[in-house]
Amino acid sequence: MRTRKNYSVSRIIFAVMLSQCGLVSSWVYAERSSIEITDILPHRGGRAEFPESTLYAYERNLRDGTSLNLDIRKTGDVPLDIVVIHDRTTNRTCDRDLLIAQSPESELKTLDAAYWFDPQGDKSFPLRGQGITIPTLEEIFTLFKENAKPGAIIWIDTKDDENYPFEENLGLYDRLIELIGNYDLWDQACVEVGAIREAEALHQRNTQIKLGYWTPTSDIEEIVQYPHIWRIGTRPSIVPEIVDLVHQSGKQLHANENHFRDEVLQAVLPFKPDAFGTDHYTKLINML
């Protein structure tokens, strides 16, 4: 591991404040003028452009040569299965309202996962009734193995149900690790956590697993010191000091700007985070 500079929390917070106020000095742009993003992660499959968290979206992501970004939840099956969906219920994206943790995969598969997809905002719902369903994690892994470009990853956010004790959600980790091993995705799957105890629980189960940590920019100095984290995810309020801090700790930095605000992208991309996530990923591809 390379030697890490001793950046203080106050310096980093001050730098973040400058970036958010548009006060980053012009020399930074001159020094870091070229845009080099090695990894694009369409947020939930690029939900501004395709039905979120569906095979329909992920097929197009891989066709465009990107990595995958997905959220997973355990089903009500015994033994449990894992499906790819962000919310704990299905009412926002599907035609019926079910609680994921209490519903079997067979019932979840009957739902229309593109029912509320309305990219133009005109209530035309163009993909209703097209057979687009909630995918299982195994379906995504199969798709990835068959179609991913070299260097692509799967960024997996484990959505533990907040209504259950932490210990009851550990079964999700066990099943996830089992599937990663079954598909030999140790080098491609990166599991996002948001607390050190989650990282410890996963690392104790299998030391091969790659871990990502989602954190506010102001907490990055603390998180880089944790040895088992491979990539740090954060909001786009980053500046060169933060990028350098992460890289000098031997880790990667993943910035996320879901709404594709031009002024944010123009300010952040020259700082060269390793990966960038957005709902509007084809716009990002065209920009690059």
Image (tube, rainbow, N blue to C red):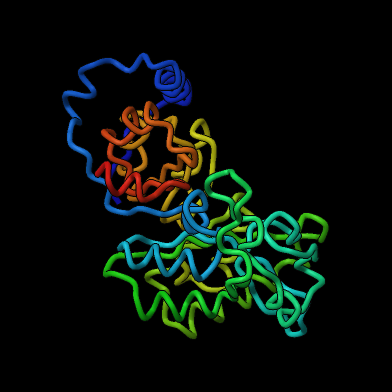
Residue 67 placed where, x, y %?
38, 61
| Frontmost residue, 169 versus 109 | 109
| Frontmost residue, 119 versus 250 | 119
Tell me if residue 143 can be seen.
Answer: yes
Q: Is residue 243 depicted above or below 89 in this figure?
A: above
Tell me if residue 201 can be seen.
Answer: no
Question: Which residue is at 78% across, 65% downward?
Answer: 96
Question: Which residue is at 47% across, 77% downward?
Answer: 141
Give the quarter of the image for residue 204.
bottom right
| Frontmost residue, 121 versus 47 | 121
Residue 119 placed where, x, y %?
53, 49
* Residue 10 appears left or right of 36: right
Q: Is residue 28 depicted above or below 254 in this figure?
A: above
Question: Which residue is at 28% across, 34% downward?
Answer: 271
* Residue 36 appears left or right of 134: left
Residue 41 placed where, x, y %?
41, 54
* Residue 52 appears left or right of 65: right
Give the quarter of the image for residue 261.
top left
* Residue 243 appears left or right of 200: left
Q: Is residue 64 depicted above or below 17 in this figure?
A: below
Give the quarter of the image for residue 160.
bottom right
| Frontmost residue, 187 versus 50 | 50
Name the quarter where the C terminus is drawn.
Answer: top left
Count numbered badges in the picture.
0
Residue 100 placed where, x, y %?
75, 67
